[in-house]
Amino acid sequence: MALGTSALLLLLLLLPRFPPHAAGCPAACRCYSATVECGALRLRVVPPGIPPGTQTLFLQDNIIARIEPGALAPLAALRRLYLHNNSLRALEPGAFRAQPRLLELALTGNRLRGLRSGVFAGLAQLRVLYLAGNHLARLLDFTFLHLPRLQELHLQENNIELLEDQALAGLSSLALLDLSRNQLGTISQEALQPLASLQVLRLTENPWRCDCALHWLGTWIKQDGQRLLSSMDKKIMCAEPPRLALQNLLDVSHSSLICIPPSVHVHPLELTANLGEDLRVACQASGYPQPLVTWRKVSQPREGQSQDQAQLEDGSPGLGGHAASDMGSGMLFLTNITLAHAGKYECEASNAGGAARVPFQLLVNASRQQPKQQALPPPPAASEPRHEAGSMAFRALGLVTQTAVAAAIALLALTALLLAAMICRRRRRRKKARAPPGEGALFVNDYSDGPCTFAQLEELRDDRGHEMFVIDRSKLLFAEGPAEAPAARGPVEGAAPGLSGPPPVAYELC
């Protein structure tokens, strides 16, 4: 009996030990040690019943569209969480607050369109964050502020077109930043300043707009950025303007990276509105790159405060609590006007080349009474006899009249087309016969009226019968005169008055 008991005890000792929480493993998942695998199970939510001691959780390749509040709360021991290739559309602020020990978070291949402020709150220990392959369009200020120990940030293959200056604030430990294959047209030097520990930077395959705002990037890559970029990552290819398309930013001279400061137009500059009305005022802006247009209301100076000290109000009535902005043309919308709307407003247009402002004055009529309109005298009675609508004479007369009018219009239109074709043919013959030598060359400054696309130049050539040339402003043939004066014999069409005086300068044509 004693021998049998000893043999049984020995057999129990030799049996494999299963983890204490294996019995509580979610259905269809596999649990071993401190790891739970629930990948490719077509799960719609985070499954309940995950052991609290789990350190690695695989939830990839499912159809999870939302992380329910509290779904991850019991998993305080998590170190690695893999949620890639799901259907996540948004993350609530503090979604991972219960995972203070998390080191690696994979959200690649989801449908995230934006990242709210505070979404990564509580992840002070996070080292690697994968956000590639989503639909992110903008990275707003302080998005990653709660990740002081993050070392790798993968943002490639998104639709990011805007990286605000403080979007990467707080990432003092970041060593790798991948922004390749996005829609970035420009990036500011201020945006990369918080990255004191950066070792690898990837910016390739973006539609870069090579203008004056990228002066710093070319210089930085040739100097401090040499150690951060591989030979492949140094190929920052320009997408616009057309004359620099498909050129490497490092091969473009600084004199070719130009901007056109914005100009602003508001009409009218002063307007009177009645109480309760709706108002819409347009602010047109031009420049290169396309300016950002912002409306603000200027607060009135208080007693003892000078006009220059008056602040701009972003929370003006009717502005929706913030300044309204638009690219290229800004519209000021005011609904249900009250006396509080009266005052001075300001439309500002800004781009990398500078800023311009135009004031607008709104007056509010305190009376709700609308001006009375003079009663119009009734129309005189027709002296001609009228046919009854149901009579045969009326129907016949209407049909004949309509047919005659339609035939007359068609005949006139055909005659006009024939005359226009004859006139155009005669003019072309006269131009070909009388054009003096050199008349066929039209020299076009590609920035005299904003950047010209190749399609626009081709259209001009077809319409005017001229051979088009684009001036390369970086290659002087003669050193006389200022290097930035346009090559023209007279005033440039569309230029501001008073700017036609500088002596002509010759440039090499491309």
Image (cartoon, rainbow, N blue to C red):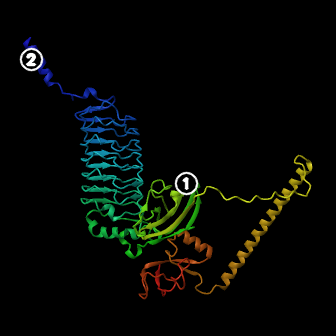
Residue displayed at 21% across by 29% down = 19
Amino acid type, mark 2: Ser
How many circles with numbers are drawn on the protein? 2
Q: Secondary structure at mark 2?
A: helix
State the residue at coordinates (40%, 47%): 112
Q: Is residue 487 left or right of residue 272?
A: left
- The percent position of residue 302, horizontal first and vertical second, equals 42, 64
Residue to which mark 2 is pinned: 6
Q: Nearer the viewer, mark 1 or mark 2?
A: 1
Visible in this render: residue 111?
A: yes
Farthest residue toward the top?
A: 1
Vertical order, 13 against 141 (above or below)? above
The mark nearer the N terminus, 1 or 2, is 2
Q: Amino acid at mark 1?
A: Thr
Image coordinates for residue 231, horizontal then vertical, percent: 30, 64
Q: Secondary structure at mark 1?
A: loop
Provide residue 320's location: percent of width, then percent of height.
Answer: 48, 53
Few, some or many C-alpha atoms within 10 Å of disc 1 (few <14, some 14-19, many ≥20)? some
Front-lying residue, 311 or 415: 311
Residue 215 location (% of width, % of height): 36, 70
Q: CA distance from mark 1 to mark 2?
A: 90 Å
| Quarter occupied by the N terminus | top left
Query: Furthest residue to the front?
Result: 303
The label on residue 335 is 1
